[in-house]
Image (tube, helix red, strand yellow):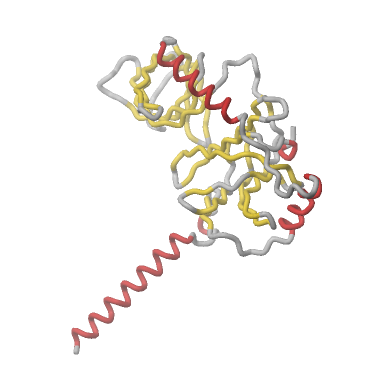
């Protein structure tokens, strides 16, 4: 399936890295256009985001109820006659999850782990996702793990920050956005884990209730698509103040963010005030 074929109202999760932090962004599809998928606008600390590096995305398509995963090339804010939105672009096909596999749920929480029972040398990790059969952990480059090692994982999750403890065995290595990760099988399916997965499944079910977005009930969706495409094609450089998440190795070529500009203006004003004080001292 192509990205612009996603059904209106489909729930979307985007796993991005912002200022070195892993974040999960939630939005929903409006409709596909020739340039990608128009989605509801997303903000980070009150500013529209422009994500220029590839991000892992997950869509629960309302048309068939299946979960599709893909990698976005860019996610940019766009201004249309109907307001501000985001446009997700991707050159890859959307592949549905293999329904025979255990359903995975993204966690993205900081955790602690011990390797082969060494509880005196706890290591930091990020719990990337979890299922009834396994768990994946993003680990530090300096953390040494071998296939077959026993890993005890602890992390907190939920509104009450309940502490979860799992005993696992390392079975494979992979990368998540260029970060080292290890996949583990779970050796103790306890009540806590089952309760967690059931609650997360209910959260996903609620995403199916996202209503479709009709930008203009007076015209057809096909006509709405044409109007939005015209607006995107004729977009002027001005748009709401946004933060830019640069692609790797291109930070020097990107314009300064609003925060950086304000910081420089503040420092310039402070230098001016100090100079005025020195002038008064000379008098």
11 lies left or right of 91: left
Q: Residue at x 55, y 47 (%)?
A: 42
Q: Position of residue 156 (x, y in %)?
A: 37, 26
224 lies left or right of 178: right
Q: Is residue 190 above or below residue 266?
A: above
Can residue 253 be seen by looking at this rendering?
no
The quadrant holding residue 66 is top right
Q: Position of residue 143 (x, y in %)?
A: 38, 28
Q: Residue at x 35, y 73 (%)?
A: 269
**Residue nearest the observer in this picture, 103 or 227:** 227
**Residue nearest the observer in this picture, 236 or 19:** 236
Q: Residue at x 47, y 61 (%)?
A: 258
Indicate the quadrant containing the C terminus: top left, top right, bottom left or bottom right: bottom left
Q: Position of residue 213 (x, y in %)?
A: 68, 42
Q: Residue at x 64, y 44 (%)?
A: 39
8 lies left or right of 167: right
């Amino acid at each position: 399936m192509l990205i612009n074929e996603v059904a209106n109202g489909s729930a979307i999760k985007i796993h991005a890295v912002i200022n070195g932090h892993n974040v999960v962004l939630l939005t929903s599809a409006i409709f596909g256009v020739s340039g990608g998928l128009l989605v509801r606008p997303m903000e980070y600390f009150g500013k529209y985001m422009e994500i220029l590096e590839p991000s892992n995305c997950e869509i629960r398509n309302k048309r068939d109820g299946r979960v599709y995963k893909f990698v976005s090339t860019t996610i940019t804010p766009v201004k249309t006659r109907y307001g501000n939105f985001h446009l997700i672009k991707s050159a890859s096909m959307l592949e549905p999850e293999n329904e025979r596999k255990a359903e995975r749920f993204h966690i993205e929480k900081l955790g602690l782990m011990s390797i082969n029972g060494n509880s005196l040398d706890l290591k930091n990790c990020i719990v990337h996702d979890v299922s009834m059969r396994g768990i994946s952990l993003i680990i530090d480059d300096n953390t040494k793990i071998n296939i077959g090692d026993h890993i005890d994982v602890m992390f907190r999750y939920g509104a009450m920050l309940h502490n979860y403890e799992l005993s696992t065995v390392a079975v494979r290595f992979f990368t998540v956005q260029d970060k080292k990760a290890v996949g583990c099988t779970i050796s103790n399916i306890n009540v806590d884990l089952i309760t967690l997965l059931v609650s997360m499944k209910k959260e996903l079910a609620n995403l199916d209730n996202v209503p479709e977005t009709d930008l203009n009930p007076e015209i057809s969706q096909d006509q709405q698509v044409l109007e939005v495409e015209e607006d995107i094609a004729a977009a002027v450089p001005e748009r709401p103040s946004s933060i830019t998440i640069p692609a790797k190795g291109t930070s020097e070529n990107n314009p300064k963010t609003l925060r950086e500009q304000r910081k420089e203006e503040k420092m310039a004003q402070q230098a001016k005030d100090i100079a005025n004080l020195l002038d008064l001292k000379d008098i």
